[in-house]
Image: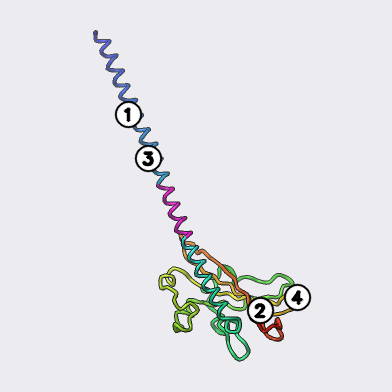
């Protein structure tokens, strides 16, 4: 084999090594991109799972509060002449920080011709922190839930459109912080006046 042929063979081999190196680098980049996509998907799935767990727990807390209010009854929640209810008095005028925990309910205004008002915003967490265990709405509420969630009650008072009977709608708002944003879960319970000048049944509903 002459010198020219040798040079040609060496050139072909060098070119093949260069192509192999480029192919290897390309494959590595493609693999890296694929792994990044997998890891990103795992992070997103983990966040969504965590968000769903928090929302589920918040819904459970709101349901417990709604059940406790229903058990307590209208007279002890709203109050009757001579006896103050849970949602009466100075506790219904919280700070602007607590009011903001309703997620905008504090800013609601009736439209033209509507007759209703946000009658009370109540910091349930603050109440239960200071109340004795026997007087708490949820005596077994976990300390971990106190740290994670905030519970606020908002009461809207309006007359029934047909009978004029007062209706008090209590909105249970449970919120928590997630990814630097506050998330909310809301549930509702309504109380109707059960007296002789209310629904005339003397049965609380």
Q: Name the residue under label 4.
A: 162
Q: In the rendered structure, which disc, 1 or 3, sits on the residue that comes first in sequence?
A: 1
Label 4, label 1: how far apart the Cα atoms are? 83 Å
> Which part of the image, by quadrant, shows the N terminus?
top left
Residue 27 position within the rendered picture, expressed as x and y whole percent measured from the top left: 37, 33
- Helix, strand, or loop for circle 1? helix
| x and y, in percent, of residue 166 in the image | 68, 79
Structural distance between the alpha carbons of marks 3 and 2: 64 Å
Q: Main secondary structure of the magenta part?
A: helix
Residue 32 tag number: 3
Q: Which residue is drawn at 67% across and 77% down?
A: 167
Q: Across the whole image, how many numbered discs are drawn on residues?
A: 4
Relative depth, front residue between 89 and 22: 89
| Mark 1 or mark 2: whose residue is earlier in sequence | 1
Q: Mark 2 points at which residue?
A: 192
Q: Residue at coordinates 39% horizontally, 36% vertically from top-left? A: 30
What stretch of residues is rendered in magenta? 39-52
Specify which label sits upstream in the sequence, 2 or 4: 4
Query: Is disc 4 placed on a helix, strand or loop?
Result: loop
The residue that appears at 42% across and 49% down in the rendered structure is 42
Q: Is residue 45 magenta?
A: yes
Q: Calculate the distance from the C-alpha at mark 3 to the C-alpha at mark 4.
A: 68 Å
Q: Residue 112 magenta-drawn?
A: no
Mark nearer the N terminus (3 vs 4)? 3
Q: Which of marks 1 and 2 is in front?
A: 2
Q: Which mark is residue 65?
A: none
Classed neighbour count for the residue bearing mark 3: other residues with Cα under 10 Å, few (<14), some (14–19), many (≥20) = few
| Element carrying mark 2 | strand
Q: Earlier in the sequence, mark 4 or mark 1?
A: 1
Relative vertical location of residue 11 with respect to residue 187 in this rendering, above or below: above
Q: What element carries label 3?
A: helix
On residue 21, the disc is 1
């Amino acid at each position: 084999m002459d010198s020219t042929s040798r040079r040609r063979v060496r050139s072909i081999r060098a070119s093949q090594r260069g192509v192999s190196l480029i192919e290897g680098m390309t494959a590595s980049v493609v693999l890296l991109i694929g792994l990044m996509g997998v890891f990103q998907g795992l992070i997103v799935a983990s966040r969504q799972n965590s968000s769903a767990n928090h929302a589920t727990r918040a819904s459970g807390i709101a349901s417990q509060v709604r059940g406790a209010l229903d058990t307590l009854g209208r007279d002890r929640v709203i109050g009757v002449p001579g006896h103050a209810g849970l949602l009466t008095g100075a506790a219904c005028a919280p700070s602007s920080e607590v009011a903001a925990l309703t997620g905008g309910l504090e800013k609601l205004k009736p439209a033209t011709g509507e007759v209703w008002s946000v009658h009370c915003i109540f910091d349930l967490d603050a109440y239960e922190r200071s109340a004795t265990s026997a007087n708490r709405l949820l005596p077994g509420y976990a300390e971990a839930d106190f740290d994670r969630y905030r519970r606020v009650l908002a009461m809207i008072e309006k007359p029934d459109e047909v009978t004029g009977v007062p209706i008090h709608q209590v909105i249970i708002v449970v919120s928590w912080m997630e990814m630097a944003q506050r998330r909310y879960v809301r549930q509702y319970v309504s109380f109707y006046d059960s007296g002789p000048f209310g629904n005339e049944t003397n049965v609380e509903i």
